Image (spheres, helix red, strand yellow):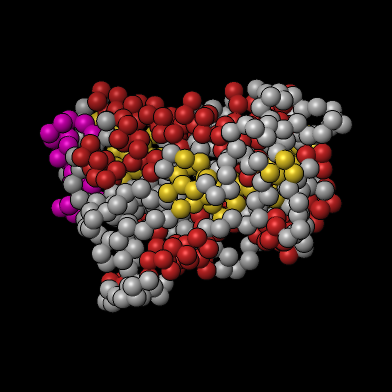
Amino acid sequence: MPEVPPGDARDRLLPLLLLRGSWWGSRDGDEEQGCNGVDFKDPDWKPMFQKEFESRFDLPHIRDLFPNASPIPSTFCLRMRTPTEDFAGGYPSDEKWHGYINNNDRVLLKVIRYSSPTSAGAECIDPDCTWVEQWVHRAGPREKIYFQPEEVKAAIVTCGGLCPGLNDVIRHIVITLEIYGVKKIVGIPFGYRGFSNEGLTEMPLSRKVVQNIHLSGGSLLGVSRGGPPISDIVDNMKKREINMLFVLGGNGTHAGANAIHNECRKRGLKVAVVGVPKTIDNDILLMDKTFGFDTAVEEAQRAINSAYIEAHSAYHGIGIVKLMGRSSGFIAMHASLASGQIDICLIPEVPFDLHGPLGVLRHLKYLIETKGSAVVCVAEGAGQDFLEKTNTKDASGNIVLSDIGVHIQQETKKYFKDIGIPADVKYIDPTYMIRACRANASDGILCTVLGQNAVHGAFAGYSGITVGICNTHYVYFPIPEVISYPRAVDPNSRMWHRCLTSTGQPDFI
């Protein structure tokens, strides 16, 4: 991952605890004092909290750096289906069109009013679970824009690992840029390293180039982890005269995008940096889901069904499927729910024992004795305490995990051999098959809208933002507010309870 200023995300961790779970003072025995210093005895604490929230979620804008920047009428015109060669007669405009988003439009971040901190999945701000409205910026095209289309050189970069939908997002960023009238659009090859490796030349992009790329998986531009220092990236952007950068990636990639945004501001450059959250694990804060997740859950059904058939067809058959989920078990949980064939679902957020009277292996024995077969779904980040630490990291700074799937397979075989019960254990790891496939229809729609809204945000003058879906509406977030830590499954959430109801599994600890 590119070099990121120390504390860039960590310093924002404490305020973000406000948004996740019951954060109030019971953590240190004082229920009258919030962990960020809010005094609940103060009758005005609620408006003060809202004001602080609005300040944190205010979107960075070009005018922050250039107060005298003059907007022009938007060139996003649905009547203009192809970009014109020039704008001699003035910019095309739909000034009377009622399709623009007002800058004051907002979307509610949370829509459930919990009456008690003990309610399933409750996210409370104070000990009384007071309802506090928290509004975030609605995404979409604005009536005024801050970039002249003919002066824009836009670049797109895809970082990290592969994910279904990358080509869909690239395609619609390009198409939407052309509708605005942008003629200089390039792709940066192989992630951030494309800014430093002289052997990697930028790829010219146009509607003609991207027209059919969504019909296949992977990324037209290629991906990689890591990259050069932020200062080198900005030097290269300045040299290439790039003034719009669209970054597709996860938490680490977004940390790099935010650092690029800050460096551009530090240098006084009029550059819009906009992120599109790409993580198959669905572990980005504050968002309903990220693109690629629905496809991953759907593709996981093939592996789970194969494991079920193998287990069901064998004498004392046990099928084990390992799915992605480094620190968040969303894929494993949703895939288990969707399949209806899983007996045990293991995720990083919920501790478990393999051995012992309450362990997973003892329950597998019970399932073999009562059902004759069993299917286990495990997220890759689950049960890492059982395994030897690798003490190595990948180029993005992520700890390289040991293989929990293989470990459970081996321990299961050994356990049943030791107790004298025959067991036919099959193990399936579909990780790279899932990552490389084409986006399904649901993700295709999500990618289309995310790509369009990323371009709308850049032309509206916003920078250091990312686009996402929140309570079914598309919104803009400041990047620091979504990268402080990975989003995780709440073991007290209704969705996890639903998964437990579906599998019928007990507590394994």
- Which of 467/367 is in front? 467
Residue under the point 73% across and 48% down: 71
- Toward which corner of the image does residue 6 lie, by quadrant? bottom right
**Residue 476 covered by magenta stretch:** no
Magenta range is 354-375
Residue under the point 50% across and 60% down: 54
Percent position (x, y) of residue 441? 49, 25
Percent position (x, y) of residue 285? 46, 52
The number of discs equals 0
- Which of 146/60 is in front? 146
Residue under the point 41% across and 29% down: 298
Quarter of the rendering occupied by the N terminus? bottom right
- Which of 1/450 is in front? 450
Work out whether residue 409 can be spotted.
Answer: no
User: Is 184 located above or below residue 71 in the figure?
Assistant: above
**Residue 363 covered by magenta stretch:** yes
- Toward which corner of the image does residue 58 lie, by quadrant? bottom right
Quarter of the rendering occupied by the C terminus? bottom left
